[in-house]
Image (cartoon, rainbow, N blue to C red):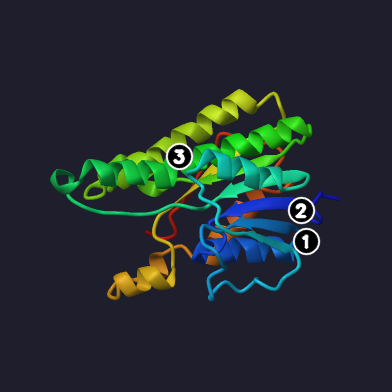
Amino acid sequence: MTETVQGKHIVVTGGTGALGAAVVGKLLADGATCHVPNAHAAAPSHFPFVSDDRVRLAHNVDLADPSKVDAFYASVPDLWASIHLAGGFTAAPVEKIESASFAEMMDTNARTAFLCCRAAVRSMLASATAGRIVNVTARAGLDPRRGAGMVAYTASKAAVAAMTVAMAEELKHKGILVNAVAPSTLDTPANRADMPDADVTKWVSLEAAAEAIAYLASPANLAMSGTLVPLYGRA
């Protein structure tokens, strides 16, 4: 019988967002306990799992602050998997991108993923856990030609992709499998509002993305590591 995430402790950064809530919901249905860092002093009102006793929310956690990240991971018992969905997006012509905006994208997407990966690896090595790490890059991160008009975002997501593959190679003899998913456009309320004329049937559903992420984070994934999984839907 294939082992499941029943009873396992899993970190989900960005867990209060649209994709995050879908992932948390899937993991809860599979029996996991989810640890969700939140940058604010309280959970957002739209987060549906505030009262679930298998969701451990930690507030005022700045994922770009190494000390805050390390303290958060130190509070998670028996870490099995760490899923990194936190991030941001910006688009602008290259000549209009300010240095601060570029740095913000690198901090929001690449730096947070690195700090969380590092903390997760330290925890897993300390407990001799053959764990799982799942990052989120983007289609533009794998094919930068699709990043026209969003150079800073594309560069930050390409960094996440490269980091994922490098870490998987480094950790392959230590039992920690590291992968990433690369979505195109996700079917979220925000994307629908921003692109009201788009054909949403070509987008990737949150449920489909959550299924892929949950598989990569589960014990059922016995061999996939260093894989950048395209989630392109019909686009």
Which mark identifies residue 111?
A: 3
First along the sequence among labels 1 and 3: 1
First along the sequence among labels 2 and 1: 2
Q: Residue at x 42, y 73 (%)?
A: 189
Q: Nearer the viewer, mark 3 or mark 2?
A: 3
Q: Give the amino acid type for the residue marked by disc 1 in the picture.
A: Gly
Tell me: 187 left or right of 122.
left
Q: Residue at x 81, y 55 (%)?
A: 7
Identify the image quadrant of residue 131. Answer: top right
Tell me: 20 left or right of 193.
right
Say what secondary structure mark 1 lies in: loop
Say what secondary structure mark 3 lies in: helix
The residues tagged by marks 2 and 1 sit, at their Cα atoms, a distance apart of 6 Å
* Residue annotated with mark 2: 5
Residue 74's x, y, as percent? 69, 42
Residues at discs 3 and 2 in contact (Cβ within 8 Å): no
The residues tagged by marks 3 and 2 sit, at their Cα atoms, a distance apart of 28 Å
Seen in the picture, residue 63 relative to 19 is either above or below; the reply is: above
* Residue annotated with mark 1: 31
- Is residue 15 in view from this perspective? yes
Residues at discs 1 and 3 in contact (Cβ within 8 Å): no
Q: Residue at x 23, y 47 (%)?
A: 148
Q: Give the amino acid type for the residue marked by disc 3 in the picture.
A: Arg
Q: Give the amino acid type for the residue marked by disc 2 in the picture.
A: Val
First along the sequence among labels 3 and 2: 2
In the picture, which quadrant includes the C terminus? bottom left
Residue 228's x, y, as percent? 50, 41
The residues tagged by marks 1 and 3 sit, at their Cα atoms, a distance apart of 30 Å
